[in-house]
Image (spheres, grey):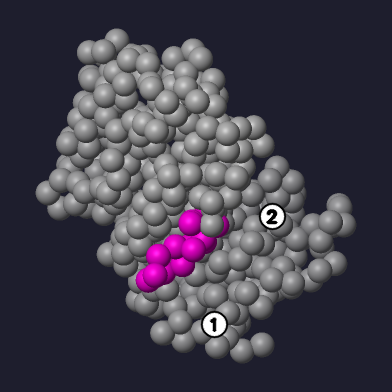
Amino acid sequence: MENYLTQIDMLFSKQEYKNRLIKTKKLMQEKGIDLLISQDTNNINYLTGYDAWSFYYSQCVIVHIDCDEPLCFIRAQDAGGAYIKTYLKNENIIVYDEKYIHTWPVHPYDALIELIQKKNWEKLNIGVEMDSHYFTAYCYEKLKHGLPNAKIKDSERLVNWVRFVKSDTEIEYMKKAAKISEGAMKVAMETIEPGLRQCDAVAEIQKALFKGTPEVGGEYASITTLLPTGKGTSASHLTATDEKFVNGEATIVELSGVVKRYHCPMARTVQLGKPEQKKIDAMKATNEALKAGIEATKPGNTANDVAQKFWGVLDKYNIKKESRTGYSIGIGYPPDWGEHTLNIYKGDMTVLQPNVCFHMIAVMQFGEWGVEASESVRVTDKGSELFCNFSRDLYIK
């Protein structure tokens, strides 16, 4: 099968993919890794351009320290997508047979081991992503027993860290995603009202997220729209039900527009009816803390510097918050849009650089109620900028 992908069709230039590979190999060399096996869906996309809902079964990208291109190891049923979506030469798309699908103890990694042996790579130092969502214990055991002469070690989110600083092209996709986030949040604020079912509101929100803008359409997000309501605002990561919104209660909306798999999440809180003063005060403190953290965001500062400014405001108001208040973002596939690198948390000494992007999310929970606001933030040459332009005030209806 021929690869009809042209330079015009590609999301990024071949040079950008080459630069990503060079950075990956540099870290591999520093970590003593000769062969990298990455099954993280985000990293597969980042290194090859591959994009399909095929991550529920074994697939990976293989980087050899001396090879000019990665290998994309993919199921036969999904090979067409690899030919269409990746920039790779046809010979670097390695297709495994359907006989390996759900036929335990036979497994796709049997074919992967055969490939490694055929390439005479079975005695190399091999890096794997031990904490990747789709790298299972069974995958690891297959490699361990099938390649007894290899030294298998954790790559420690190697490619995730290569993704940490975005290119200008990646930033442009995120800016487009931010416009979709703004439009969907506007729909959320306008739609949510007493008596309406939560699921009906999310139906309108999802429509807006997929419809996108006149310039660019949206895609599915790696996290579904989150919608804690009433007492649920004191909890995290709750989703819509068919229950109706109630006058006097607040609802937190967390969503993200997506363009070419790049996310720009945002959270806001809407109050139905007259709010209690405690909610107004909590929202004010939340926004003040976010502002302080964002103002501390600049090249050379650390994640800890941002966190200290954020928690300094919370301490002033005697508000307790144990969870982190931010994390790096960019490419996203289910089940998460975080990059698993930087955390905006006390003690994280990661140094901020231009084009590092993170979701700074302030979740304030108080027993039976809570408020929330968040911003997607880009580090610039001199400071920072927000991707989205949408008021963080408590939206009162």
Residue 362 versus residue 160: which sits nearer the camera?
Answer: 362
- Count neighbours of disc 1 (C-alpha within 10 A) and say few if under 14, some if 14 to 19, many if 20 or more: few
What main secondary structure does the magenta stretch of the protein show?
loop
Element type at mark 1: loop
Residue beneath the point at 53% across and 75% down = 86
Provide residue 312's location: percent of width, then percent of height: 23, 19
Going by the numbered disc 2, the residue's amino acid type is Tyr
Q: Note whether residue 326 is visible.
A: no
Q: Quadrant of the C terminus?
A: top left
Image position of 150 with respect to 114: above or below: above
Residue range (magenta): 208-221
**Residue ID for mark 2:** 56
Q: Secondary structure at mark 2?
A: loop
- Along the polypeptide, which appears first: circle 1 or circle 2? 2
Residue furthest toward the left? Answer: 382
Disc sitting over residue 89 in the figure: 1
Q: Residue 60: which quarter of the image? A: bottom right
Within the magenta stretch, is there residue 213? Answer: yes
**Gap between marks 1 and 2, in whole Å?**
25 Å
When the figure is inspected, residue 64 is found, relative to residue 371, above or below; the finding is below
Q: Nearer the viewer, mark 1 or mark 2?
A: 2
Is 392 left, or right, of 104 in this rendering?
A: left
**Do the residues under discs 1 and 2 have CB atoms within 8 angstroms?**
no
Residue at the image point whose x is 35% and y is 62% from the top: 176
Q: Quadrant of the N terminus?
A: bottom right
